[in-house]
Amino acid sequence: MSFVRMFLTGALTLTVGCNRSPSAKVGDAEPLDPVQLLEQARLTSAPNVPPPIARTSAARVVLNVEIREHKDTLAYGVPYTYWSFGDETPGKFIRVREGDMVETHLSNHPDNSLAHNIDFHGATGPGGGGEASFVAPGHTATFTWRAMRPGLYLYHCVAPPAGLHIANGMYGLLLVEPKGGLPVVDKEYFVVQGEFYTQGKYGERGPQHFAMEKALREQPEYVVFNGRVGALMGSSALKAKVGETVRLYLGNAGPALTSSFHIVGEIFDSVYAEGGIWANQHNVQTTSVPVGGSAMVEFRVDVPGDYTFVDHSMFRAFNKGAMGQLRVDGLQNDLIFSGRTSETVYAPGTHLEQLPNVALASADGGSPKGLETDPGAQLFATVCATCHQAGGQGLPNVFPPLAGSDFLMADKARSIRVLLSGLKGEVRVNGARYVGEMPKLPLGDEQISAVLSYVRSSFGNRGDTVTLAEVKRERSALEATQAAGLRVSAVEAQ
Ligand code: HEC
Ligand SMILES: [Cu+2]
């Protein structure tokens, strides 16, 4: 933008009157008069959303987007070559106003090896701009389109094969704000679901490459929010305070699976289904976000705590990465949610001895730490916490605690064997008796070393790391005994 144009923009902004027409109906076309204001597009990186647009008339919005083919981290220890708008997946959130002319400059970085383009679902015109923007490395394509219809829209690359470009990360969200704006809320964030089809299985270390057979079968190894496993977990969780209203802008790039978006322990006050601008439903538990589509949800947060959000197709959430967190700070409100008030033994006429009432140990150390960077923390949150609970405190009589567990800390080799073979029969942990079964989990040696190192040094535990060599030693010993025809369980080996 030239200096003169910038100066003009400033001057014009000052002289615009406040002529918002409250009677304007949705669907009324903005009069197609020449747009006089000029400004740079408002863009933010995930999960942040640019502030509402205060202008009361249309502008010519200059949007510069650069395409990068670059290495980034898909999950701990898993580098992947992303193709992105900008250098992040999802691309930046673009906020324009109904009636704006969007002057789009799409630059394909000279280091890239492929041609790409951009299809704005919010544009009216052939290909959403796909043809107009198709551009080779080292070139910039420019085209202008008018944001005729307000709503929340996906944008993505549609260069052939389009599925591959999307699966490699070329997508983002665009909000065309209605003339009168959206209802005012305290916090706005955006979350885009996407799939990754890697040659290696979920969590397998080392650089991963796209697997076409898996894509054709629509069986991704990864289903993630905002581009990678743990992007919205732990210290990167979305944040709000008790009493605040939150709007989430949801997108689903797919390219295959419809999302059933759900926040555990929260109800959407309003849902704008499929990203239209009418709140068409209230009090919704789960909303679907179609592939190539969007939805907006609004809710007020009333009770503090960590709220996990998922694609409620549960194996995607717990085994493929489709999980994030919203951390709500503020004062407890017992009139809405008391938290656990007591815990007693339930033994209706069984032979079980009556155990004394056990107070539930509170989670030491608060929320899980380092989820996005520590593979052990990630595994704990997605695998172990289901049974041993988020703070490692266990469930009295059902799941033994890992927090402060004498059983865990007394014998490192034995704890490795528990993870290698599972555990069945009676165990005593901190004086309490547990008769249950921990299944043999499909964990590799690196995963066992990571999760045990994490568990043995978290929740108040003070242990040293469990090295890969130690795990391998136990595995060979186990295999040797098995080969010798001896069946041992970790319990017998105590
Ligand atoms: C499906 C539920 C389940 C999952 C998932 C699970 N465990 Fe367990 N775990 C149990 C049960 C039940 C026991 C007690 C078994 C018994 O009574 O013999 C146990 C026992 C243990 C023990 C020994 C007792 C203690 O408290 O120190 C350790 C250590 C342990 N689990 C670690 C883990 C780790 C680490 C993970 C995650 C990689 C994990 N478990 C995942 C159910 C589970
Ligand atoms: Cu592309």
Image (tube, helix red, strand yellow):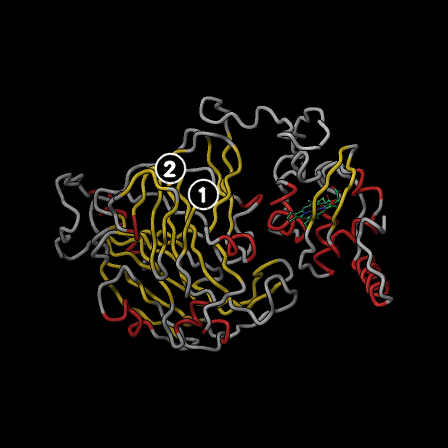
Q: Is residue 294 above or below residue 367?
A: below
At x 46% / y 32%, what residue is drawn?
241
Tag 2 near tag 1, CB within 8 Å? yes
Where is residue 224? Give x, y as percent.
50, 57
Residue under the image location 13 percent in, 51 percent down: 28
Query: 97 above or below 405?
Result: below
Residue 96 shows in this picture: no
SS of the residue under disc 2: strand
Graded by Cα atoms within 10 Å as few (under 14), some (14 to 19) or many (20 or more), the crowding at tag 2 reads many
**What residue is disc 1 on?**
263
Question: Residue at the top extreme?
Answer: 335
Indicate the secondary structure of the residue bearing disc 1: strand
Q: Quadrant of residue 390?
A: top right
Q: Is residue 121 left or right of residue 310?
A: left
Question: Could you tell me residue 135's position as x and y percent?
Answer: 37, 75
Q: Is residue 44 left or right of residue 460?
A: left
| Mark linked to residue 355 | none
